[in-house]
Image (cartoon, rainbow, N blue to C red):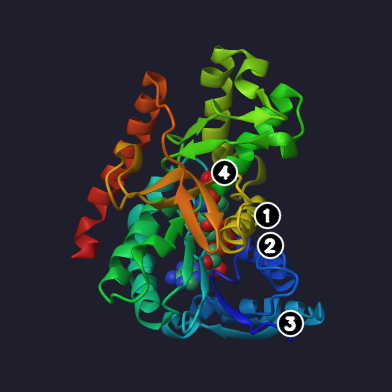
Amino acid sequence: MSKAPVRVAVTGAAGQIGYSLLFRIASGEMLGKDQPVILQLLDLPQAQKAVKGVMMELEDCAFPLLAGMIATDDPNVAFKDAQVALLVGARPRGPGMERKDLLTENAKIFTVQGAAIGQYAAPDCKVLVVGNPCNTNAYIAMKTAEKYGRVPAKNFTGMLRLDHNRALSQLAAKSGRAVSSLKSLVVWGNHSPTMYADYRFVTSNGDAVKSLINDEAWNRDVFLPTVGKRGAAIIEARGLSSAASAANAAIDHIRDWVLGSNGEWVTMGVPSDGSYGIPEGIIYGFPVTTENGEYKIIQGLDIDAFSRERMTNTLNELLEEREGVKDLLG
Ligand SMILES: NC(=O)c1ccc[n+]([C@@H]2O[C@H](COP(=O)([O-])OP(=O)(O)OC[C@H]3O[C@@H](n4cnc5c(N)ncnc54)[C@H](O)[C@@H]3O)[C@@H](O)[C@H]2O)c1
Ligand SMILES: O=C(O)C[C@H](O)C(=O)O
């Protein structure tokens, strides 16, 4: 018997990430090749015509798993009974801006959407915030939804997977090993240049990749800045922020969360439970494994002085961002 469709809400459906994302969700790449989906598409009133155009193209693909679609400019409708919510819609940064420059502009979107999720989404809805600054936006949505006591705080996550994937590619190129052979990478903290891509535990076919590379200066002076500033480098080159790679990371994040990571570590921005001294509730990139729709933070990793300094630096930025939005959360 075929499975019941899963309702997937996607905001910013008319945007460039939306255009890379929706077709892959409808083709089964996110929730599985046997899982029908209903797409619930949210965008602003002025973008509804463009959303209709995207829906026409989705129809024209005749995806067997696409069991239905709606378009709306009303968050309460878009999130109704959603079991997965991808919060993409927000203004992207342009050249010369940092992601946190978007904070005041985008933050309000996430109070409204957090309230809609808190009231109308399925109680086990899994939420991924992509719109920047995504950690703090996820925090805002989580805190707003919390007031309704339905969707648990642990279900609100931010996207560090693009940073994780970027770091994997850089490590593969430097070590000469296949990307698929690399295990146990972590990206700690904020999706911003302060993030800490920690390659100390990475192995490839049983070999320690740090020893293979054997170049601490490369780690500090090339690897960390390249991964941290990759978003800006793409904006500089494309004139637009990353889209297909961001959509790909969103698919990876939700797929692993729902279908499991088979014991592999993946990076998710999740509300801290106090692990590694990160204050509870801060949405911070942690290494996790996922199973049966739940994630678990990897415990007991050794944090050396260099790593602690980096982890504290990115935490301090998140604390500052939290301070910047406290009035919104009342
Ligand atoms: N976390 C990450 O790794 C990552 C990666 C890439 C981009 N991003 C962020 O994702 C966001 C979207 O990027 P994009 O390139 O698709 O931008 P875009 O400008 O192409 O599209 C954004 C879409 O969101 C819509 N929108 C704006 N406000 C909305 C609201 N309140 N409700 C619903 N829809 C709304 C817009 O109308 C537009 O259609 C940006 O904030 C960008 O910085 C994050
Ligand atoms: O950098 C940006 O502003 C977009 C996105 O967050 C990225 O990392 O590519």
**Residue 27 x, y percent position in the rendering:** 75, 71
Sequence order check: which comes first, mark 2 or mark 1? Answer: 2
Q: Secondary structure at mark 4?
A: loop
Q: Residue at x 46, y 84 (%)?
A: 80
**Label 4, label 1: how far apart the Cα atoms are:** 23 Å
Q: Is residue 220 left or right of residue 4?
A: left
**Residue 77 x, y percent position in the rendering:** 47, 86
**Residue 8 x, y percent position in the rendering:** 57, 75
Of badges 3 and 4, nearer the viewer stands 4
For mark 2, what is the residue? 20
**Residue 54 x, y percent position in the rendering:** 69, 76
**Res. 244 mark:** 1
Sequence order check: which comes first, mark 3 or mark 4? Answer: 3
Q: Nearer the viewer, residue 30 or 141?
A: 30
Q: Are marks 4 and 1 in contact (CB under 8 Å)?
A: no
Q: Is residue 52 left or right of residue 122?
A: right
Residue flagged by tag 4: what amino acid is it? Trp
Of badges 2 and 4, nearer the viewer stands 4
Residue flagged by tag 3: what amino acid is it? Met
Q: Residue at x 61, y 45 (%)?
A: 264
Of badges 4 and 1, nearer the viewer stands 4
Quadrant in which residue 118 is drawn: bottom left
